[in-house]
Amino acid sequence: MAIEPIASRIPSAATIKSPAKPGIETGSAKAQSEPNNDRIEITANSGQIKKALDTAANLPVIDNERVASIKQALAEGTYAIDPERIAQKISQFELLSTEDSP
């Protein structure tokens, strides 16, 4: 089973269309006779988000070399588990997850 990057599931702005509202004409004559009051605002964060999505899309999902080396170490019985490092990473994760919650 292949894991798709999250960026591949996010529709681009060009493919998102607003549904037509009832009672509103979409003909070219109607659109040309009224002024266009549509606005778009792009925040500073949107550029950072796009850059992050582009970077994530180019990263490999699986580091095959690392997987192979861990498999080999497990098969040889030489894979070392550091329980203190695991506990430290769990603590870091818990601290980060509690900071994000309201």
Image (spheres, rainbow, N blue to C red):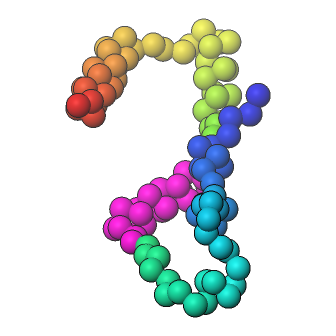
Chain part drawn in magenta:
41-58
Q: Residue at x 76, y 28 (%)?
A: 1
Which of the image's four quarters has the C terminus?
top left
The residue furthest right is: 1
Q: Is residue 49 left or right of residue 62?
A: left
- Farthest bottom residue in view: 33
| Picture quadrant of residue 41 | bottom left
Q: Can residue 60 be seen in this view?
A: no
Q: In which quarter of the image is residue 72?
A: top right
Residue 18 falls left or right of residue 84: right
User: Can residue 13 be seen in this snapshot?
Assistant: yes
Residue 43 position in % (x across, y down): 35, 67
On the image, which quarter does residue 85 sit in? top left
Viewer-closest of 25 and 17: 25
Residue at left 68%, top 35%?
3
What is the tally of numbered marks visible in this picture?
0
